Image (cartoon, rainbow, N blue to C red):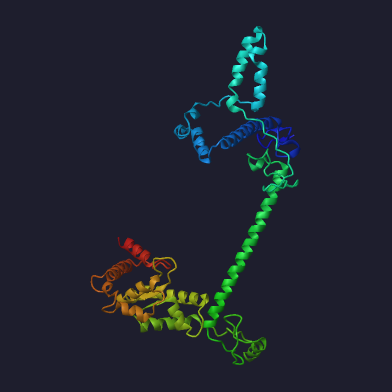
Amino acid sequence: MNACTECGKRRYLMPLHGDKGGPLMCPICIGAWNAEHTKRRKWGRIVIKAMGMYLNEGGRWNDLDRLKMAVGGYGWAASALAPDYLNCDLAADVPDITSDLLDDILQLVHPDRHPEVRGDLAKRVTQDLLLLKPFVFPAPKPEPEPSGTYSKQTPVEPEAPWKKPYPCEICADVDTNYYCSDCKAEQAKRIERNKAREEEARKAQNARNRSRYNWRRGAWLETLPVPECESCGEEFIPKRLDAKYCSPACRQRAYRKRDGKASNSGTVGGAYIEEIILAAFTAEPDNAFTTQDLCARVWPETHIWKKHRTAVIAVARGITERQWRETPEAAWDWDSGWTPGCKIVFFNSASNLSYAMRRLKTDNWNRYASDEELRAKLQPGGEEHKYIVEGGSWRGHWQEYLTAKRAAEMTDSPKIDGVLLTNRNDAAAEVAA
């Protein structure tokens, strides 16, 4: 006694498919399930036979599609084949008998073979049996025995006895939850086989990606200058991009010379970074600086990594926040553009040219252009000069930015860190309103 998987009631349970297994269900649910699916399988076999006979008599596959539309209610599709197709009635439960058997039964119940007492009954039964003729099929003909002569037809090898059909006849049109034990075992095997195949494909794809990455990395390393060992001065091929010594012996020798101090003990501090950035802001008030530009000024002979960019961004943003509170009329600001993936750019909010350079450097189309090329675009005769003159769109945006900035200064509103320039303008306009 346990809960039935179909109705959930506690009853006596048995496998759905008997000896073949299946989910445990109560006898009532098993009977209802078999009544539904057995009847459907029976009609399915009848439809398969009818389709085969139709094709054997010269029917086409396209005709079967139109017949399916007629079954679904689109009778005009079947009327193109023959008008008689619309006059059929399949409502009655048609027994699965052959045409030969039906002919034999008709001979037995024919009125001429019975006395007059049973004449009316035999006549009525004969008429009912004649209605079944459109729905019966001839008995399959036995295959001819091989005559021993040569045949061009390739013999079909018999199916291996261990290869069972999947899913079987019982589980062909049911959900996988109602599979028998053999079909469930075969399903588990196929799932494991597919997982193994996907894992092999993933490993192969990873190997191809790794090969392409190594090729690109090797091509990039060839463009870099050959480094020299900081201990012995000899050139060497590094295994890592930040390698400083050619061998463990040179690394140990340098360690002894430093008296045990770490090699990065003299790391550039925040005060030095701030001094370099302030010097760049003061020397070029009409320019705009990307994070890469500032990193190149702080570490001119070092490959720039993420840690360098993070340090420069933190210090430069601190400078802009301090200037906003101390000297807002000449404060530097920052923006990251409007499209995803744009770099952070620091610009002088009091300079129209610096604002224009910020517009150019936040545009992804100019990511590979130098400062000289960008300044040439803003000079008289350049393609972007029309935007910075009186009446130009960029000059108008810069003036709107200054107006919103002054409104925020009058209300003593604190500057919000980490938002885009457009969001700052909106916040300032809201405060002014």
- The percent position of residue 179, horizontal first and vertical second, equals 68, 41
Q: Quadrant of residue 165?
A: top right
Note whether 230 is above or below 332 in the view shown: below
Q: Which is more toward the observer, 292 or 220?
A: 220
Note whether 379 is above or below 24 in the view shown: below
Q: Which is more toward the observer, 374 or 255?
A: 374
Question: Would residue 362 be seen by someone viewing this image from the given angle?
Answer: no
Left or right position of 429 against 66: left
Q: Residue furthest top?
A: 117
The residue lying at 37 percent from left, 64 percent from top is 423
Q: Which is more toward the observer, 349 or 50?
A: 50
- The percent position of residue 282, horizontal first and vertical second, equals 36, 83
The residue lying at 39 percent from left, 68 percent from top is 337
Note whether 129 is above or below 295 in the view shown: above
Q: Residue furthest left?
A: 390
Left or right position of 372 against 72: left
- The percent position of residue 335, horizontal first and vertical second, equals 39, 70
**Could you tell me how many numbered marks the image carries?**
0
